[in-house]
Amino acid sequence: MQHIGMEILKPVAVLAGWTMIMWIWMYATRLPAMTAAKLNPDDLAKNPTNSLDDYLPAQIQWKAHNYNHLHEAPTVFYAVALALALIGQGDGLNATLGWAYVALRVAHSLVQATVNKVLLRFSLFALSSLCLMALVLHLLIALFH
């Protein structure tokens, strides 16, 4: 059964799934690197100033940094997309913006987790932020118009 305004939930589900893929990738690379470096997590936890960034190769940590990033700005996307769906405004342009946001965030993840070119990463982040800003604006217009 198709519900009006719910198309934006598809990119929401895909981004949530992508976040779980990044979690798997992070631990699939981080745990072997910790073993190879002979790091004991309990020893690291005893000193709050310790960071895995100090002990693991940067390219291993890039995945962890990206996983953390997927819990920052995307939380606003989730809230706005769910609100748009709730009020029946998640179809059409808003769904397209949702898909663009997700595609840009996935591209951002792939860049950060592999080559980590900061200017490219920033460009993808900025473009995704513009999509998110448009969704926020559309939600505000729908609610206050």
Image: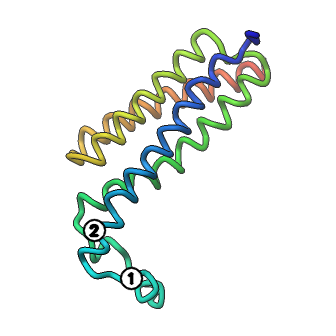
| Residue picked out by circle 2 | 33
| Residue picked out by circle 1 | 50
Picture residue at 72% right of the left edge, 22% below the top: 85
Report the amino acid beneath label 1.
Asn
Is 52 located above or below residue 28 in the figure?
Answer: below
Q: Quadrant of the N terminus?
A: top right
Residue 125 shows up from this direction: yes
Report the amino acid beneath label 2.
Ala
> Which callout, 1 or 2, points to the residue nearer the camera?
2
x, y percent for residue 120:
25, 38
Q: In this rendering, would 48 be left or right of 60?
A: right
Picture residue at 30% right of the left edge, 41% below the top: 121
Q: In this rendering, would 89 be left or right of 35?
A: right
Picture residue at 36% right of the left edge, 57% below the top: 28
Residue 64 shows up from this direction: no
Q: Considering the numbered disc 2 on the image, is that residue within a helix, a strand or a loop?
A: helix
x, y percent for residue 93:
57, 12
Q: In this rendering, would 66 be left or right of 139?
A: left
Is 126 located above or below residue 22 in the figure?
Answer: above
Picture residue at 70% right of the left edge, 18% below the top: 6
Question: Who is closer to the viewer here, 24 or 87?
Answer: 24
